[in-house]
């Protein structure tokens, strides 16, 4: 009979421990993770730098408009700057690059983070190779969420507007002030419900992406498994808490990058500093999100499915 030793790291983790494990893994394997995310950041940065003075022209127009009274002339100046800078073409190019490279980088990061969860160090080559193998399912998950998110957004806006309007007309004949107050209250409550649902769905998205990459599941199966893993009595509120933490850290990194980029732009008056610092912040936020997603995925499966026990059962005698 084989003997098995208990690994104290293979246990359900609290929210704080998950964040700590994520940061620890990121720090210890910073260069490989940043190299994986550079698959996205480098092409996007190059594309932005190739647009001469594009962003600076828009920023200058916005800065000038802030010291002028609002009006058609001010709006037209900003619009001309956007058109002259070819911002629309830049956005199309950037979105095309991200659509191709983001699933590859995300899959690579999740594979390496999952290996790190087991105490193993995946090489950059192995991680990227895994990302290439699971690129199509990862793209399928992303596209499915974009389509579903678009439909859900339209439905949410309709629900907020319809709810407020219905409340207003229902009580307008009774008291106008009451009708207005109820309309506002219903709209605010509906908005809070929609925002909370969006927060929870953040973790569903991360788990579905992880399932497509780490379980070799097709996109629809991966999304279905993610919903069943999050929408449980024990995991729902925990997922909401972790999603808020994930969003907060990502926003903090993005704001820090914008502040650093703004400072660099104010000194040099060149796009390069703003672009480089903002992309560096995006790079760090991206790596954090997908490492955290992999850690949470492994923790959820350990809690609900006992994956460590499954590995013991499958071990050769």
Image (cartoon, rainbow, N blue to C red):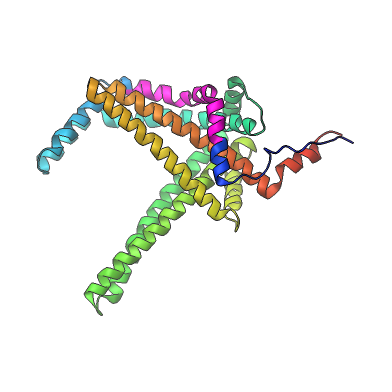
Seen as rendered, the residue at the extreme bottom is 174
Magenta residue check for 29 = yes
Q: Judge by depth and name the residue closer to the eye, 305 or 157.
A: 305
Decide: is 175 above or below 242: below
Q: Quadrant of residue 220?
A: top right
Q: How many marks?
A: 0
Residue at position x 67%, y 33% in the image:
118
Image quadrant holding the N terminus, namely top right
In the image, 22 versus 81, the foreground residue is 22
Residue 50, compared with residue 238, is above or below; it is above
Q: Indicate whether 269 appears above or below 188.
A: above
Q: Is residue 80 visible?
A: no
Q: Is residue 55 left or right of residue 249?
A: left
Residue, x 59% and y 20% (percent of image)?
Answer: 125
Residue 25 at least partly seen:
yes
Magenta-drawn stretch, dominant element (helix, strand or loop)? helix
Please provide percent x and percent y for residue 148: 46, 48
Q: Which residues are magenta?
A: 22-48
Residue at 39% x, 56% y is 156
Q: Residue furthest right?
A: 1
Location of the C terminus (image quadrant): top right
Position of residue 183 in the picture relative to residue 306 (left or right): left
Q: Position of residue 162 (x, y in %)?
A: 34, 64
Residue at 66% in and 30% down: 119
Q: Name above or below for residue 157 compared with residue 141.
A: below
Question: In the image, residue 68 lies at what x, y percent?
Answer: 10, 39
Whether 146 is among the magenta residues is no
């Amino acid at each position: 009979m084989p003997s098995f030793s208990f690994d104290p790291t293979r246990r359900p983790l609290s929210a704080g421990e998950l964040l700590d494990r994520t940061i620890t893994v990121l720090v210890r394997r910073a260069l490989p993770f940043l190299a994986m995310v550079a698959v996205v950041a480098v092409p996007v940065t190059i594309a932005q730098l190739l647009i001469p003075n594009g962003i600076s022209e828009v920023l200058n127009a916005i800065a000038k408009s802030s010291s002028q009274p609002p009006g058609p002339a001010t709006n037209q100046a900003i619009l001309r700057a956007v058109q002259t800078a070819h911002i629309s073409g830049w956005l199309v190019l950037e979105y095309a690059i991200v659509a191709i490279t983001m699933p590859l980088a995300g899959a690579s990061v999740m594979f390496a983070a999952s290996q790190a969860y087991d105490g193993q160090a995946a090489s950059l080559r192995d991680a990227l190779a895994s990302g290439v193998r699971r690129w199509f399912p990862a793209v399928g998950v992303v596209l499915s969420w974009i389509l579903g998110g678009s439909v859900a957004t339209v439905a949410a806006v309709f629900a907020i507007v319809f709810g407020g309007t219905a409340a207003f007309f229902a009580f307008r004949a009774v008291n106008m002030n009451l009708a207005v107050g109820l309309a506002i209250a219903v709209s605010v409550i509906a908005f809070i419900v929609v925002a909370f649902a969006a927060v929870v769905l953040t973790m569903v998205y991360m788990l579905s992406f992880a399932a497509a990459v780490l379980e070799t599941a097709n996109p629809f199966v991966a999304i279905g498994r993610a919903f069943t893993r999050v929408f449980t009595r024990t995991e729902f509120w925990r997922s909401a808490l972790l999603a808020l933490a994930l969003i907060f850290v990502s926003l903090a990194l993005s704001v820090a990058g914008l502040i650093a980029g703004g400072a660099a732009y104010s000194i040099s008056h060149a796009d390069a500093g703003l672009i480089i610092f903002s992309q560096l912040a995006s790079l760090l936020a991206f790596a954090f999100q997908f490492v955290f997603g992999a850690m949470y995925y492994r923790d959820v499966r350990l809690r609900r499915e006992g994956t460590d026990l499954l590995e013991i059962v499958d071990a050769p005698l």
